[in-house]
Amino acid sequence: MASFIMAMTINPNAKKMHPDLSHQINESLELFTKNEIKVINLFATLGRYDYLAIFDAPDQSLAFRVAAEINLKGVLETETWPVVPYEDFTQIIK
């Protein structure tokens, strides 16, 4: 399994188009479960991003496909970053 962080912002147009925005956001986030991606943590934030998901996926292709599917719904805009644990990184750069 590979680990990823996905930062998400609410699309400004979605705020105008969807009276029940929280339902639309939940539908977008269900794409993780539908694609058998394990969400480790999901946070709401006060800052540049509205939500932050930390998740594991079998591979980068699936993680990026789910990000694209979330973006296509038009409610959330995403940035997705592959990550490695710090301890693993220190071994890589030795």
Image: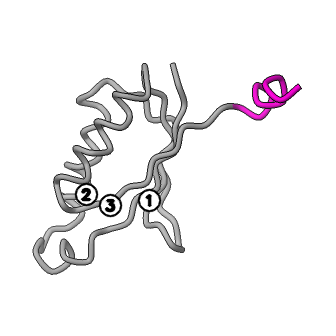
Residue drawn at x 12%, y 74% as measured from the top left: 19
User: Residue 66: x, y in percent?
Assistant: 29, 38
The amino acid type of the residue labelled 2 equals Ile
Instruction: Tell whether label 2 touches label 1 (CB within 8 Å).
Output: yes
Magenta span: 85-94
Residue at position x 66%, y 32% in the image: 84
Q: Amino acid at mark 3?
A: Glu
Which residue position is annotated with label 1? 51
As helix, strand or loop, the secondary structure at mark 3 comes to: strand
Residue 24, placed above or below residue 83: below
Where's the C terminus, which quadrant?
A: top right
Give the crowd class for mark 2: few <14, some 14-19, many >=20 residues within 10 Å. Answer: some
- Alpha-carbon span between mark 1 and mark 3: 10 Å
| Residue at the outermost bottom position | 16
**Kind of element beneath mark 2:** helix
| Spatial CA span between label 1 and label 2 | 10 Å
- Residue nearest the viewer, comparing 78 with 41: 78
Report the residue at 54% width, 31% height from top: 3
At 32% across and 68% down in the image, what residue appears?
A: 10
Which residue position is annotated with label 2? Answer: 25
Q: Earlier in the sequence, mark 1 or mark 3?
A: 1
Q: Which mark is residue 77?
A: 3
Give the side of residue 82 with respect to residue 58, left or right: right
